[in-house]
Amino acid sequence: MDRFLIRNNKKPNDGTQNSEPAPKKKKYDESSVKVRRYFVNKKHSLVTVWKLQKWHLSSKALRASYAVSYLVAKQKKPHTIAECLISPALVKVSEIMFDTKTATALQSIPVSNNTISRRIEDIASNIVMQVIEQIKLTKMFALQLDESTDVSGEAQVIVFVRYQDCSDIRENILFCQNLQSRTTGEELFKVIDKFFAEGGHLVGLLSISLQ
């Protein structure tokens, strides 16, 4: 009977009485939240380090690819030699002298036939731009032309440039181009004029004497 009276003695809350809501119980305590936040931050830092290492490895692989391409071009070897011989040799030597991790890193160096061709073109363009920049710093320079015919019967002209670099006199190949028409002095002048005009390299007047 006492239990019945106690249960019926409770009145529903009609808003007339001010009662504060009971605080909600947290699903996780503070220690577990801190632990979870620690591991989340640790994951983000590890991902960042992994991305930086991957970028650093890719950067080194790119530099190595250009270095191999330069050696292939300098030795006048077929572009396929890098993929068929140089890369397998590097991997095999690293496996014997170092470890498989180093060998795997060497396998990431791009040395395919098309890649080597593009790298050589990039290197050639960069060398030409360096020569052009050096020419711009000189007051005068001299050009020398060599016209010849290749094995296919096409006429080609090689243009050499001689200029002063500080106290030294340098001579470099400026460009080589096929001649589609006659090999006259006028046509040769047009080829040279077009080269300087397209790149905006020519400043002032250029006088050429052909014999």
Image (cartoon, grey):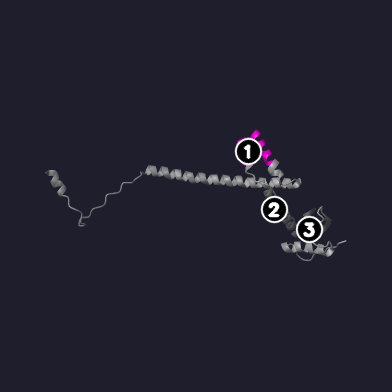
Image spot of residue 30 (x, y percent): 37, 44
Rendered residue at 70%/47% (across/down): 69
Considering only vertical position in the picture, is 207 above or below 169?
below
Name the residue beneath numbered marker 1: 103
Image spot of residue 193 (x, y percent): 77, 64
The earlier-in-sequence mark between 2 and 1 is 1
Q: Is residue 167 visible?
A: no
Q: CA distance from mark 1 to mark 3?
A: 43 Å
Looking at numbered disc 1 in the image, what kind of residue is underneath it? Ala
Name the residue beneath numbered marker 2: 122
- The numbered mark at residue 178 is 3
The kind of secondary structure element at disc 2 is helix
Rendered residue at 66%/36% (across/down): 92
The kind of secondary structure element at disc 1 is helix
Q: Quadrant of the N terminus?
A: top left
Q: Is residue 48 left or right of residue 26?
A: right
Extent of the magenta region: 86-105
Q: Is residue 128 left or right of residue 32?
A: right
Residue 130: image quadrant is bottom right
Residue 134 shown in magenta: no
Looking at numbered disc 2 in the image, what kind of residue is underneath it? Asp
Considering only vertical position in the picture, is 49 above or below 172?
above
Image spot of residue 166 (x, y percent): 77, 54
Q: Is residue 114 left or right of residue 182?
A: left
- Disc 1, disc 3: CB below 8 Å? no
Looking at numbered disc 3 in the image, what kind of residue is underneath it? Asn
Q: CA distance from mark 3 to mark 2?
A: 20 Å
Q: CA distance from mark 2 to mark 1?
A: 27 Å
Count of numbered circles in the view: 3
The kind of secondary structure element at disc 3 is strand
Rendered residue at 50%/45% (across/down): 45
